[in-house]
Image (spheres, helix red, strand yellow):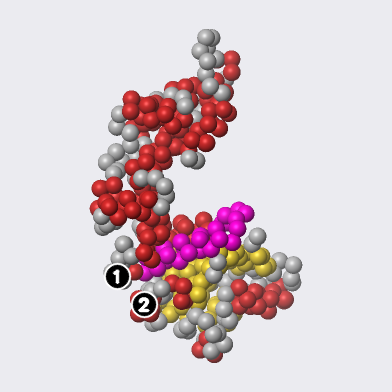
């Protein structure tokens, strides 16, 4: 369950002191100066994933500082990645200044002074983890603090997406699962820094989990490309096809089967569109990279137990039961969907 700290119940006069305490308790000792005469409500919702913490922060204008005196109070150094959702922020550290717009993120290091200025109401997601867990060289990390990373980039976009989803909550899960999710986030961040430092070794054991996440994201974005293959994916990520196959061995599948399963799932979803919006079976197959409609139909039946046309007709009859044709047994959408879910989970 997330831990929520909020100044909602307090009067504006009480909020400044309480907010300063909440920020320092959640992250590290910080100086906080609120820029409003009557401070707005501030909330922080945090969850733990092993040693990594996610926090969704919403509040009014303020300036946050990390001074040498505050640094001397900490025995451990921390890294914070802040992904801006609303409002803007200016992060200053190591002689650089990063202007963050919604969708951007930046890294700060608690071991050196920094200043963050937010001149309007804002919301951001912060990922907070021990510096030692990141396993990147000091000079490489220092070179990338207070720099803008865009969520529209390839690797940086994957990092932003993963961190946002992690902070949105995973539902009930045990400690080992949460630790694993936190480790993947840490590996992705390290991979991003290594990539920007031109020191990325994709085949390093430390990079394997992050590389697999990066490759899956690439595949999902390119499912409609009929030329998507182990060879094209390997070339796009500058790794060998053999290495790709090795990564997917840990998934108990092959890369080709992983692509096929996700393409079939997209087709199954599109075939359930309401009457009037539904494409033909052949059009749906081509949309998701199947060159041969007949081959697609065979795969669909083998996976879900019904043909694509039967699946589509079942949904139409479900919407309009009076339209069912005599003498033609059409599978129940509920039963078909259940069988499909069981097949997809294998």
- Please tell me which residue is depicted at 35% across the width and 80% down the height of the picture: 139
Q: Left or right: where does residue 38 sit relative to residue 210?
A: right
Q: Is residue 125 visible?
A: no
- Please tell me which residue is depicted at 74% across the width and 70% down the height of the picture: 10
Indicate yes or no whether the magenta region holds residue 176: yes
Upstream in the sequence, badge 1 or badge 2?
2
Residue at the spot of label 2: 137
- Please tell me which residue is depicted at 49% across the width and 35% down the height of the picture: 343
The percent position of residue 32, horizontal first and vertical second, equals 59, 79
Mark 2 Cα shell of 10 Å, populated few (<14), some (14-19), many (≥20)? few
Work out which quarter of the rendered image holds the N terminus and state it: bottom right
Element at badge 1?
loop
The percent position of residue 38, horizontal first and vertical second, equals 67, 73
Residue at the spot of label 1: 199
The residue range painted magenta reads 168-193
Dividing the picture into quarters, in which one does residue 309 lie? top left
Helix, strand or loop for the magenta stretch, by majority:
helix
Dividing the picture into quarters, in which one does residue 134 lie? bottom left
- Please tell me which residue is depicted at 41% across the width and 63% down the height of the picture: 188
Indicate yes or no whether the magenta region holds residue 318: no
Q: Is residue 184 above or below residue 36?
A: above
């Amino acid at each position: 369950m997330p831990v929520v700290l909020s100044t909602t119940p307090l009067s504006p006069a009480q909020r400044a002191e309480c907010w300063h305490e909440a920020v320092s308790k959640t992250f590290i000792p910080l100086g906080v100066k609120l820029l409003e005469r009557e401070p707005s409500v501030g909330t922080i919702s945090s969850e733990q994933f092993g040693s990594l913490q996610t926090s969704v922060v919403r509040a009014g204008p303020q300036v946050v500082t990390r001074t040498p005196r505050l640094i001397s109070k900490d025995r451990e150094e921390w890294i914070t990645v802040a992904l801006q959702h609303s409002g803007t922020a200016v992060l200053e550290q190591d002689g650089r200044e990063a202007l963050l717009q919604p969708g951007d993120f930046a890294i700060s290091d608690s071991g050196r002074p920094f200043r963050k200025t937010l001149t309007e109401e804002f919301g951001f997601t912060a990922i907070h983890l021990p510096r030692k867990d990141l396993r990147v060289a000091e000079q490489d990390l220092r070179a990338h603090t207070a720099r803008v990373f865009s969520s529209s980039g390839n690797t940086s976009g994957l990092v932003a997406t993963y961190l946002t989803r992690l902070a949105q909550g995973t539902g009930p899960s045990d400690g080992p699962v949460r630790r694993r999710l936190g480790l993947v986030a840490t590996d992705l961040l390290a991979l991003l820094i290594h990539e920007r430092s031109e020191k990325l070794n994709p085949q390093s054991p430390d990079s394997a989990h992050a590389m697999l996440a990066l490759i899956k994201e690439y595949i999902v974005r390119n499912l409609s490309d009929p030329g998507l293959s182990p060879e094209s994916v390997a070339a796009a990520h500058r790794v060998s096809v053999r290495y790709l196959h090795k990564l997917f061995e840990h998934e108990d599948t092959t890369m080709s089967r992983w692509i096929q399963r996700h393409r079939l799932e997209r087709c199954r979803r599109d075939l359930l569109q309401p009457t009037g919006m539904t494409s033909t079976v052949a059009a749906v197959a081509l949309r998701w990279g199947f060159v041969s409609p007949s081959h697609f139909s065979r795969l669909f039946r083998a996976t879900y137990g019904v043909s694509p046309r039967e699946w589509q007709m079942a949904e139409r009859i479900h919407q309009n039961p009076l339209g069912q044709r005599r003498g033609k047994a059409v599978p129940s959408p509920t039963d078909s969907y259940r069988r499909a879910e069981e097949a997809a989970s294998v």
